[in-house]
Amino acid sequence: MARNIVLTLTGKDRIGLVDQVASLVAKRDGNVEASKMARLGGEFAMLMLVAIPEANISNLDRDLQTLRGEGCQIIMVQTEADSKKYAGWLPYEIEVTGADHEGIIHEIAHFLASRGINIESMDTSSAPAPMSGTPLFTMKGVALVPPQLNFNDWSDSLEEVGDRLNVSVKAEVVK
């Protein structure tokens, strides 16, 4: 019987790291169901949902010892599907842009949590503006909103948070 595991890996960035991990998963008859990967500074971070036969989980963990020996941090956690947990909740794309400064992620995340809104995914970055070189912040994410929350109420309040932070905030239903 296949089990789902969440595999996280962080380590020094190098060519072939994704290939090596994917090969080890395939060797144990596993399949990468979903993943997020990024180079952050000089490190590489990998987050995968892997479906793998239960009998092969310990073998995969043993196979990953080679990477641990190279300095990679690896965690494997068995998980269950929770498709009913947020049944009926509405997905919204949230985008935040503006001059980068401390506290933007915290303020947005705190606002969402205080309203009972769940962050499903979030990607953030900061890059120099083309002309001035001023760091520009971008956040894109998907949040699940409880059905009892009125869109205009929470989205207007979220825009007020953005105004206070001097960033643009947009929320729209996922299409």
Image (spheres, helix red, strand yellow):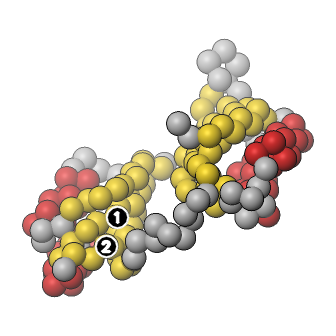
Q: Residues within 10 Å of mark 1 (few under 14, many from 20)?
A: many
Q: Which residue matches tag 2?
A: 4
Quadrant of the rendered structure where residue 148 is?
bottom right
| Residue 147 percent location from the top left of the image | 69, 57
The reply to whether dot 1 and dot 2 touch (C-beta < 8 Å) is: yes
Please name the amino acid that badge 2 sits on.
Answer: Asn
Where residue 158 appears, as percent x and y from the top left, is 80, 45
Secondary structure beneath dot 1 equals strand
Give the residue pinned by disc 1. 49
Whole-percent x, y for residue 168 in the image: 76, 32
Res. 120 visible in picture? yes
Q: Is residue 42 above or below residue 8?
A: above
Given the image, on which type of amino acid does mark 1 rest? Leu
Considering depth in this image, is 19 or 121 the residue closer to the camera? 121
> In screen coordinates, is 102 left or right of 27?
right
Say left or right for 140 vs 105. Answer: left
